[in-house]
Image (cartoon, rainbow, N blue to C red):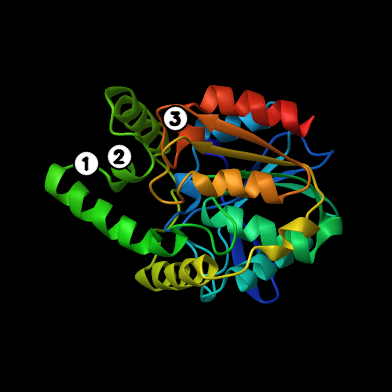
């Protein structure tokens, strides 16, 4: 079983259906995936998910209002974190590892601060602390990439997630091909209302205060590309500096999606870290 053909499942979370997919052998501490702005289940790289499944029970889900999940997406990272915790508790999980990418990395920080006993280890990729440099500009960067994609016949992720070098763009093509391998039972697409709420949450996070990061004593792996255009790479260095128990991995010639560009290396780093 691969992420490409994992079953769509649904669970009631306080009266709202949350859609998820899970893979891997149950038992041990599961890895819960927290996703990026505009993303649904089909935006997770099967290369990353299947790599983690080699050693872990992995759960990907659509948070409130996202994709095929019900409800209305809240406009704050803190509320998104509460919803994620409610989903984890609905699955009757007492301890999880978190992999938060971009917006998901913001959510992972809040979960670790508010529910420290629920979390064992954290991976934060392509993300940054509250109040981080350039994070409030994410919406403008997204808009610019959508315009460039329209003009060039490419996908916005070519511009947002990957470097503009030949290597970066070849990796973008390979990544998008992996995302398109699933042909049946794809997730519902993201709504404009959800994107608006996510952008409002990101904008507020970009004006927030990172002082509570010192409370996170969990082991954290911080990963990014060396030239992230969405959450500037300086934010990853700042996370690693502020978190009491962090290690940092920076991928060369890579942007926001460095973990997808170098997914075999990232998966190995993640497996080593989670052990």
Q: Estimate the x, y position of residue 146 in percent, counting from the top left.
A: 25, 54
Q: Is residue 247 left or right of residue 161?
A: right
Q: Earlier in the sequence, mark 3 or mark 1?
A: 1
Residue furthest left in the image:
151
Secondary structure found at label 3 = helix
Tag 2 residue? 158
For the point 55% across and 36% down, the residue is 3
User: Whole-Å distance between the Cαs marked 3 and 2?
Assistant: 11 Å
**Which quarter of the figure is the C terminus placed in?**
top right
Which percent across, then down, holds residue 19?
58, 58
Relative image position of residue 102 (x, y in whole percent) = 52, 51
Checking the image for residue 154, the label placed there is 1
Give the residue displayed 45% in from the left and 48% down from the top.
232
Q: SS class of the residue under badge 2?
A: helix
What is the distance, in whole Å, between disc 1 and disc 2 at their CAs?
7 Å
Q: Report if the CB atoms under discs 1 and 2 are less than 8 Å apart.
A: yes
Badge 2 crowding class, 10 Å Cα cut-off, few under 14, some 14 to 19, many 20 or more, is many
Check disc 3 and report the residue beneath it. 261
């Amino acid at each position: 079983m691969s992420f490409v053909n994992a079953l769509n499942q649904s669970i009631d979370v306080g009266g709202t259906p949350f859609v998820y997919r899970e893979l891997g052998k149950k038992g041990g501490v599961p890895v819960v995936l927290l996703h990026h702005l505009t993303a649904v289940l089909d935006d997770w790289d099967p290369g990353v998910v299947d790599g983690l499944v080699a050693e872990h029970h992995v759960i990907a889900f659509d948070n409130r209002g996202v994709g095929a999940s019900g409800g209305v997406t809240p406009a704050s990272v803190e509320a998104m974190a509460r919803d994620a915790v409610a989903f984890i508790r609905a699955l009757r999980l007492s301890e999880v590892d978190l992999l938060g990418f971009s917006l998901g990395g913001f959510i992972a920080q809040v979960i670790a601060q508010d529910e420290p006993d629920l979390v064992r280890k954290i991976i934060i990729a392509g993300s940054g602390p509250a109040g981080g440099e350039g994070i409030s500009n994410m919406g403008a960067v997204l808009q610019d990439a959508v315009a460039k994609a329209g003009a060039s016949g490419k996908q916005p992720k070519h511009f947002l997630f990957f470097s503009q070098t030949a290597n970066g763009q070849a990796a973008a093509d390979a990544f998008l091909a992996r995302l398109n391998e699933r042909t049946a039972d794809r997730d519902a697409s993201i709504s404009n209302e959800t994107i608006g709420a996510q952008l409002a949450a990101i904008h507020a996070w970009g004006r927030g205060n990172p002082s509570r990061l010192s409370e996170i004593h969990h082991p954290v792996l911080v990963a990014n590309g060396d030239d992230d255009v969405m959450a500037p790479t300086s934010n990853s260095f700042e996370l690693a500096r502020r978190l009491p128990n962090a290690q940092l991995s920076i991928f060369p010639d890579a942007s926001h999606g460095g973990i997808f560009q170098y997914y075999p290396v990232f998966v190995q780093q993640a497996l080593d870290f989670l052990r």
